[in-house]
Image: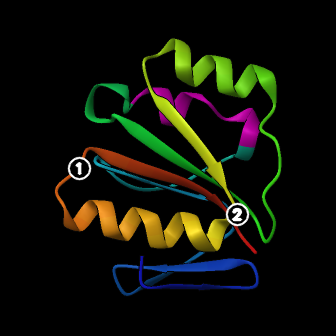
Amino acid sequence: IDGYGPGFFRIGGAVREGPVAVLPTGTHSWGGFEDTATLVAAADALDVLFIGTGAEIAPLPVAFREALEGAGIGVEAMASPPACRTYNVLLSEGRRIGAALLPV
């Protein structure tokens, strides 16, 4: 994840508008907390998924968290800026991670 700003993320040099999922399978548009299918589909390739909740940290909807944890995905919620930084650090260590990010 190269950067972010109001309403967008720059990932691998490309600008992506709106919510995005950065997964071992690639970068995908993400439908927010209502869209668990995109994330659960990558469960076999993930140990931890960072959920960027936007400019501020916010609690995750219970059904969203339960769907991901039920699929065997560890979930860590944080504001989107630290989620991007943490994703980059752990990716450089070769960890099995992903990020689902709401824009700031």
Q: Find the magenta span and give its range.
A: 33-41
Q: How many marks?
A: 2
**Residue type at the position of mark 1:** Arg
Residue 79, numbered label: 2
Outermost residue toward the left? 94
Q: Which element carries disc 2, helix, strand or loop?
A: loop
Q: Quadrant of the N terminus?
A: bottom left
Earlier-in-chain disc, 2 versus 1: 2
Q: Is residue 98 above or below residue 75?
A: below
Look at the numbered discs 2 and 1 and tell me whether their residues touch, using CB distance below 8 Å: no
Residue 26: x and y in percent read 33, 55
Residue 45 lies left or right of residue 102; in this view the side is left
Q: Is residue 33 above or below residue 78?
A: above
Residue 54: x and y in percent read 76, 65
Q: Tell me the distance, in whole angstroms, between the alpha carbons under discs 2 and 1.
A: 20 Å
Query: Is 77 in the magenta?
Result: no
Q: Which element carries disc 1, helix, strand or loop?
A: loop
Query: Is 36 in the magenta?
Result: yes
Foreground residue among 10 and 68: 68
Q: Residue at x 34, y 79 (%)?
A: 12
Foreground residue among 78 and 32: 78
Q: Quadrant of the C terminus?
A: bottom right
Residue 37: x and y in percent read 55, 28
Q: Residue at x 30, y 60 (%)?
A: 90
Q: Residue at x 69, y 67 (%)?
A: 18
Residue 45 lies left or right of residue 68; in this view the side is left
Residue 95, numbered label: 1
Does the magenta stretch mainly form a helix, a strand or a loop? helix
Foreground residue among 98 and 9: 98
